[in-house]
Amino acid sequence: MTTAQTVRIASGEISGTGTDVRVYRGIPYAAPPVGPLRWRPPQPVAAWSGVHDGSQFGFDPMQLNEPSRGSLAPGTSEDCLTLNVWAPATVPAGGAPVLVWFDGGGFIAGSGAKARTDGERFAKLGAILVTVNYRVGVFGFLAHPALTAESPQHASGNYGFLDAVAALQWVRANVAAFGGDPARVTAFGESAGGAVAALLLISPLARGTFDQVILQSPGSFRPLCPLADAETAGRVVGDDLTAMRAIPADELLAMNAKINPAVRGLTIPRPLRPIIDGWAIDRDEVDAFRSGAFAHVPTIVGSNANEGGWFTANIPVKTTDKLRDYVAQNFGDDFDEAWTHYGAAADTDVVRAVGDAFGDAQFSYGARSLAREIVKRQHKTFRYLFTHAGAHTSDPPVHSDDITYVFGTGTFAARDRRVSDAMMAAWVHFAATGDPNGPGAPRWAPYDAIADNYLTFGDDFPEGAKWRLAPLEFIERFYAARA
């Protein structure tokens, strides 16, 4: 490929590739979090001499299986705090709007180097795309009493989330060098990445680092684990902090399975993800949104028609007897009402019921709840439901199926491309103006909590309302009774 122009940022010069789209890969935005910097907040990157080669992606965060999911990174490493920039060759006066992507992966996986999140099409639409690596699993979210004790803030466990904050600070400081407008930064992500973007709204450390958010299937609005509980779970790694920091990365990676349950609980806090540490996240997410203690910025939030369908293969619940146990374990004294929404009369219906329970509790409830709270203080709140099945299947879209449509990277038939083009146009208009309406995008009315309306991204783009209302209201009552 043709070498793109060299740019200079605060830490040095970077060369890239491309002509009509300029691409700069593997840019360090923080110091390598290795050795004594393992389990510490991200530190400033050291300036370099010469020109950094931006033709190759950096290493993915340490994880078990992400390279098999389409990552183009050379491998995994603790030295992973890099980001990637796609920029149009020609940018308008005043700079291009900027979208900053945080990948999903349940907080144990993720990559900014996936083929499906390539930024070329965004750049051709006049936006700058930045994809970010942040620490995951035990490297990014281990809380431990010894880590809390050494912290000046008396906090531990949210290192991966602090990486996201550092990346947004980097974007504010440096994106103008690539032709971006540092005053128009949209943080967005899917699943765990959507949860990161939602938590950025409530974090006191993230104030002023972004201007808008797009929350795709956010794993949000469930109770967060308190620091003390996460510290207890983290002690499985050891008690001697010096010895813990000396554990080889490959051996430490195995600790994920000792902290995470084999089957995710639907309604209980998880310790190996962002927690209430009293510093980066100083209160429960639900309390923050309901009290208005969040950044009141324009927001898009939505989910997919069959969020839970992707997960059912790994949940060992295939009979009605097992389903009864599953519902009882997750909803306790509310079993009878839960069964009206997630029960099954025959074994053949069990997988569908498990998928509904998982999708509602983990994603759809959070998307609806966020829209309902955010719109109280920000009228530019837009909700969507992704229903497009794709030209090669009749099945409703499962978790993460929307990503290739948002990035325009799928192998598409004509009707698929129409949906993708509409989503991309809406995302770019939103990044530019705080409103997704504009040429090439479907008409999208702001969310109204009473109407409970949303735009459907399907074969057409009608407005819908009150999607899965009864089960989502049940989950809301379930949590309210335990608050």
Image (tube, rainbow, N blue to C red):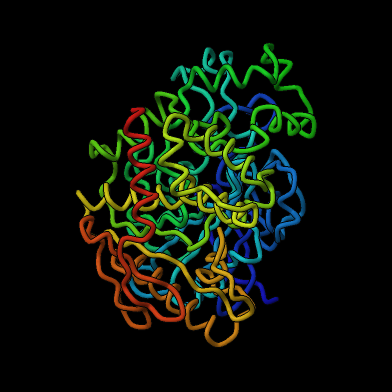
Q: In this view, does 103 lie to the left or right of 293?
A: right
> Quick one: quadrant of the C terminus?
top left
Q: Residue at x 64, y 57 (%)?
A: 348
**Number of numbered callouts drawn:** 0
Q: Which of 126 and 55 is in front in this view?
A: 126
Whether residue 157 is visible, yes or no, is yes
Q: Position of residue 25 (x, y in %)?
A: 63, 59
In the rendered view, tell whether residue 473 sits above or below residue 285.
below
Q: Nearer the viewer, residue 347 or 171?
A: 347
Q: Which residue is drawn at 68% across and 63% down?
A: 55
The image quadrant of residue 259 is top right
Q: Where is residue 412 in the image (x, y as percent from the top left)?
A: 60, 81
In the rendered view, tell whether residue 469 sits above or below residue 330.
below
The image quadrant of residue 456 is bottom left
Q: Is residue 246 left or right of residue 201?
A: right
Q: Which residue is drawn at 42% across and 64% down?
A: 180
Q: Residue at x 22, y 59 (%)?
A: 448
